[in-house]
Amino acid sequence: MGIKITTTGHYLPPHIVSNHDLTAFLDTSDEWIKKRTGISQRYISTGENTSELAAKAANVILEKRGISSEEIDFIILATMTPDASSPSTACLVQEKIGATNAFCFDINAACSGFVYALSTACHLMRSGMYKKGLVLGAETMSKIVNWEDRSTAVLFGDGAGGLLLEESETDHFVAEDLHSDGSRFIALTADDKKVTNPFAAATDDVVTAKQYLQMDGRGIFDFVIRSVPKTITDVVAKGNLVKEDIDWVVAHQANIRLLEAISKKVKLPLSKFASNIAETGNTSAASIPVLLSQMVDSGQVAIGDGSHILFTGFGGGLTWGSIIIKL
Ligand code: ACO
């Protein structure tokens, strides 16, 4: 028995913030942001939390597929911006969409989250115990960004996307290659939670500063250039394919210059790297499913067209990894 991606969907909050809008309160410019990142605008939540964005994406998927939420066996949601530590955001989505028969949990692998969640879902389905699983990536990055820090505030956006996996005669999953390196965690941190109980040693740490996302931009750039071309090459080999077999690379949308550098190093033409970074900014775990869903909606790819799509994610942890599917 195989596993098939049958439906995709996404939801972006309606409020658009252009680069120009940011210049009202940040010492930055449209020219700097576009040249360094490729970003022109981003969607920013004016109140909807991660579970609300994700539930809207999930409802799009269910409506497109024409099935009831009660048919869903599990919901796996990738996020680094959950509504709360408990309950999981996946359980909140369950409650919102009425998926009463599902078991639900979150995965946090930062910007690699969707690739990790898709791998986990694939292996659960392989057990033969489940028929339908929802895999979602959703973020409200706007709530962990320091809006006074121009070096990070300009990069991120909010959104949610996902897909439905179903038991099937055909199989879409070709190969995967996942990695983490916790020794380099310091390059990207957010929402640091200190032990502050009545028995804890006193600390001079300024806790609030660490609640914001902090990033070593150059460090991340170097990590991506070293690690991502290798995972792309390795997953192609694991799938017994050659690079030319790959029709689309759907990479985490962090920065257009990163996509250009990866394309050059891995010797795959940039035209094969799908991108929506100009429109959405970096939506972390939501970036890959939102982009895939937009590609399906625009007819760039179609489920059942046999194209090889290589997903590659990279981000905090550090984490990185790739999955190849044959649609
Ligand atoms: N507007 C104007 N100037 C700015 C801005 C801004 N928004 N941000 C920083 N600058 C200034 C800096 O203050 C610095 O000024 P100085 O030279 O006077 O000190 C100058 O621009 C250069 O700053 P750098 O941080 O060195 O800029 P860099 O060329 O490295 O570009 C960037 C920064 C875009 C973040 C780059 O490092 C990068 O692409 N890193 C990859 C990491 C990434 O994309 N992270 C996303 C999240 S992580 C993930 O998704 C995996």
Image: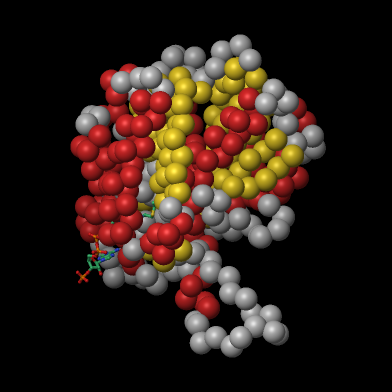
Q: Residue at x 51, y 49 (%)?
A: 109
Camera-nearest residue between 123 and 4: 123
Q: What percent of the width, then of the height, locates residue 300?
A: 39, 23
Determine which quarter of the picture holds residue 59: top right
Left or right: residue 193 versus residue 218 is right
Question: Relative to 102, is 112 above or below?
Answer: below
Left or right: residue 119 versus residue 230 is right
Q: Which residue is drawn at 32% across and 52% down?
A: 223
Q: What percent of the width, then of the height, locates residue 143?
A: 52, 62
Camera-nearest residue between 33 and 125: 125
Left or right: residue 40 versus residue 3 is left
Colour mapping = secondary structure
Determine which quarter of the picture holds residue 229: top left
Q: What percent of the width, then of the height, locates residue 327?
A: 47, 19
Residue closest to the far top = 169
Question: Relative to 145, is 324 above or below?
Answer: above
Determine which quarter of the picture holds residue 228: top left
Q: What percent of the width, then of the height, locates residue 164?
A: 61, 28
Q: Residue 128: in sight, yes or no?
A: yes
Q: Residue at x 22, y 31 (%)?
A: 267
For ligand 1, the image quadrant comes to bottom left
Quarter placement of the N terminus: top right
Q: Residue 53: in sight, yes or no?
A: no
Counting labels gives 0
Camera-nearest residue between 56 and 71: 71
Q: Which residue is drawn at 45% across and 49% down?
A: 180
